[in-house]
């Protein structure tokens, strides 16, 4: 039993260096901003996961960058713009309007086409009756 406990203790020393990062903030609003920004930023390594749920080293680096920029007093928009400059538009879950104008306007255009087609179809049916 003592040998088992010794092996368990030694394995924790060798393999137990699991990083658990803690961030301390001066006020609650900065802490809330930090955690909300983590949810808005996707992990470049993990597909479909935010950095909040990722343990990848790049996610840890992004978290540290967000933390330091919050401490420097930067706004959320400045932090997200900086991350977009470094990692590209794909790093945020909210695509910009300028780069994806077709994707933003397609539902409206599609709806208008359906209304227009329905109107033409209904006019043709009224003439037949």
Image (spheres, rainbow, N blue to C red):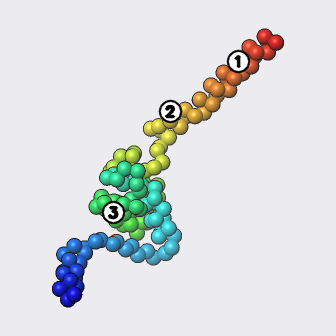
Q: Which residue occupies the foreground of this view, 10 or 83? A: 10
Kind of element beneath mark 3: loop
Q: Residue tagged by mark 2?
A: 102
Rendered position, 87 above or below 72: above
- Mark 2 neighbour class, 10 Å CA radius: few under 14, some 14 to 19, many 20 or more: few
Quarter of image, res 127: top right
Whole-percent x and y of residue 4?
20, 83
User: Mark 2 touching mark 1, by CB under 8 A?
Assistant: no
Kind of element beneath mark 2: helix
Lower position in the chain sequence, tag 3 or tag 1: 3
Kind of element beneath mark 1: helix
Q: Which residue occupies the foreground of this view, 92 or 9? A: 9
Residue 55: mark in rendering: 3
Residue at figure coordinates x 53%, y 37% from the top left: 104
Farthest residue, direction front? 1
Quarter of image, res 26: bottom left
Residue at figure coordinates x 23%, y 78% from the top left: 12
- Mark 3 neighbour class, 10 Å CA radius: few under 14, some 14 to 19, many 20 or more: some
Lower position in the chain sequence, tag 2 or tag 3: 3
Give the alpha-carbon distance from disc 2 to disc 3, as whole Å: 35 Å
- Mark 1 neighbour class, 10 Å CA radius: few under 14, some 14 to 19, many 20 or more: few
- Res 98 visible: yes
Residue at figure coordinates x 66%, y 21% from the top left: 117
Q: Which image quarter is the N terminus in?
A: bottom left
- Res 69 visible: no
Q: Which residue occupies the foreground of this view, 81 or 103? A: 103
Q: Residue tagged by mark 1?
A: 120
Give the alpha-carbon distance from disc 3 to disc 1, as whole Å: 56 Å
Farthest residue, direction right? 129
Give the alpha-carbon distance from disc 2 to disc 1, as whole Å: 26 Å
């Amino acid at each position: 039993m003592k040998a088992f406990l010794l092996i368990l203790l030694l394995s924790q020393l060798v393999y137990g260096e699991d990083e658990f990062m803690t961030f301390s903030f001066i006020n609650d609003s900065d802490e809330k901003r930090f955690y909300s920004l983590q949810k808005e930023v996707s992990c470049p390594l993990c597909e479909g996961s935010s950095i909040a749920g990722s343990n990848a080293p790049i996610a840890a680096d992004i978290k540290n960058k967000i933390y330091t920029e919050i401490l420097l007093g930067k706004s959320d928009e400045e932090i997200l713009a900086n991350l977009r400059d470094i990692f590209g538009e794909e790093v945020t879950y909210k695509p910009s309007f300028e780069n994806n104008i077709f994707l933003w306007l397609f539902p409206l255009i599609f709806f208008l086409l359906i209304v227009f087609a329905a109107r033409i179809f209904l006019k043709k049916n009224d003439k037949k009756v």
